[in-house]
Image: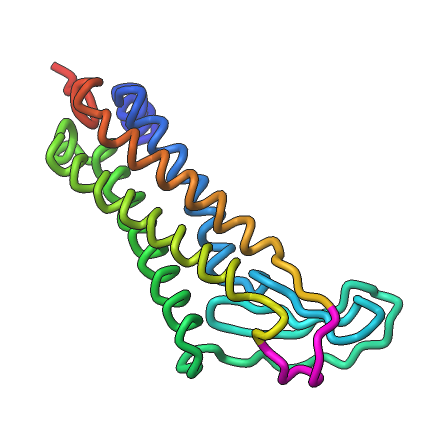
Amino acid sequence: MGLYLVGSFKGANIFTKLAFIFLLCAMLFGWVAYCTNNWGRSFPSDTNSVYKGFGIWRNGAGNQDPDTQFTPINLEANDGWLLEWYGAFQAFATFGFICLNVGFFLVVLFMFVTPCKSNADLSFWNAINTIFGSICWLVAIILFGVRFDEKFDERFSGRTRERTLHYSFGLAIITFALQLAAGILLLLTKRGGGAVQSSK
């Protein structure tokens, strides 16, 4: 089995190999970005240690200073939030996330499942899926980056001293770039002889 997987990977053309690697990395970053609540942070106090983290589906509080006394705050659900731009942000991030998972699954089929090897048509439509997903990530990134300002949420303490984007936002940007690059590479698979070169 191991030799078959290695042989299938070696038999793939360079574009498909790179697309596989890019999508594998994008899956890692995309899952973290999608599931964590650190797209942005708001700091309601002058100490800049206690913060509220904002994610796609959850908000939660944290503490950057381990020496500061801190009372944890329960996570708050964002689903069903009556904030139009946040709902659009959630929708586009979800579309991008779904396309990412589908794209990686199809690349695995192209490389390791015999009936799917050298199927240039499926590779083309997977490229469209992957590029569409990257555009959805981009829209979500722009929405959050532009609208996450000082007027976004005043419920935490009545005022906010500082608001910053954080690591989940950065991981989403990396996911977008990797997914877009993988989609372009999948469009080029015909130049390399299909998704996977047939062994005769």
Dominant secondary structure of the residues highlighted in magenta in the image: loop
In the picture provided, is 85 more to the left or to the right than 166?
A: left
Residue 188 relative to residue 150: left or right: left
Q: Nearer the viewer, residue 85 or 191?
A: 85
* Colour scheme of the rendered structure: rainbow
Image point (47%, 71%), residue name: 57
Outermost residue, top direction? 200
Query: Which is more toward the observer, 7 or 71?
Result: 71
Q: Is residue 156 magenta?
A: yes
What percent of the width, then of the height, locates residue 115? 11, 34
Residue at left offset 47%, top offset 77%:
78
Query: Residue 20: image x %, image y %?
Result: 34, 34
Q: Residue at x 76, y 71 (%)?
A: 50
Residue 164 is covered by the magenta coloring: no
Which quarter of the image is occupied by the C terminus?
top left
- Which residues, given as a range, are shown in magenta? 153-161
Q: Where does the N terminus fall, quadrant-wise?
A: top left
Left or right: residue 14 versus residue 76 is left
Q: Is residue 86 above or below residue 110?
A: below
